[in-house]
Amino acid sequence: MLPLGYREIAFETIGSTSDEARRLAGLGADHGTVVWALEQIAGHGRRGRVWASPPGNLYCSVILRPDCALAAASELSMVAAVALGDTLAELLPHSDKVRLKWPNDVLVDGAKIAGMLLECDTGADGRVDAVVLGIGMNLVSAPQIARYPTISLADLDIFIEPEAMLHRVIGHLDRWFTQWQQHGFEPVRAAWLDVAFQLGHQIELARGEEILSGRFADIGQGGALLLENEGELVSVFGGEWTTNRSAPASGL
Ligand code: BTN
């Protein structure tokens, strides 16, 4: 079952649950509207990349209406990440295998098992009208992607139907969303950092043509990754990891 205040709209096949959720949000659909599908034929991820969406995995998009400024809405990707992390940790015999990779990925054993796409519509006053949080999670199959390793729950001998997983995910999402609304970003940030991938490591991020490198020191306001170089901190908002194989920084 979904928590109180949420309702699901299910499709067998759809282009993209996020496109549909954005359409519904534009028509005034409530906070807590969840669109999900057994399969997507035009699923997309960040940077417009294709998100392969064969039957058996989880594809859902949630409409959130947080009533906040755009800068704060980006914190919702961390809210969603900790919710996904908790969902997976309670299913896995070794919950310490779950790691959150900035900004929006969830890893198990270093391989991507879930990704999130946060899309935001603002009103004329600059405040957030609706956020559509799209979630894809590999339940039965993991699309092969050249840039990074992938894994599914079935690879770990865990079998769960998409709708059952949806209910678990939304339960944790609602809990963390409420926490964020009532207590702000700090508890979310702390929970995220607790299971962060490569925190304290020397990393490299590509931002457009630019390569940023430094020690992954912390997470700042709005979910920015703080890169440290010789004592100086730089806040990074958009960027892509260039490698998964960075070495720990000395002293850690
Ligand atoms: C990423 O890692 O790039 C984010 C992937 C997000 C995929 C999900 S699947 C459900 C929803 N519908 C989409 O078209 N995309 C998101």
Image: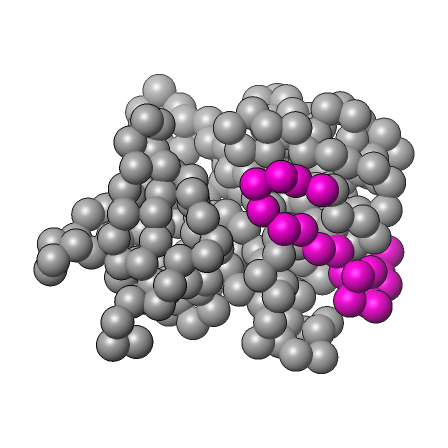
Outermost residue, left direction? 231
Q: Residue at x 83, y 53 (%)?
A: 140
Q: Residue at x 46, y 27 (%)?
A: 121
Q: Is residue 204 above or below residue 52?
A: below
Q: Residue at x 35, y 20 (%)?
A: 124
Tell me where the magenta segment starts and ends, as one range: 144-161
Q: Position of residue 221 (x, y in %)?
A: 27, 52
Q: Say whether residue 169 is left or right of residue 41.
A: left
In the image, is residue 149 part of the stretch drawn in magenta?
yes
Instruction: Depth check: give the residue in front, 24 or 199.
Output: 199
Q: Position of residue 43 (x, y in %)?
A: 70, 29
Q: How is the image coloured?
A: one colour
Q: Say whether residue 66 is left or right of residue 61.
A: left
Where is the N terminus found, in terms of image quarters? bottom right
Q: Position of residue 244 (x, y in %)?
A: 48, 53
- For the question of whether residue 123 can be seen, the reply is yes
Q: Position of residue 243 (x, y in %)?
A: 45, 48
Q: Say whether residue 59 is left or right of residue 252.
A: right
In the image, is residue 245 part of the stretch drawn in magenta?
no
Outermost residue, bottom direction? 93
Q: Residue at x 16, y 54 (%)?
A: 229
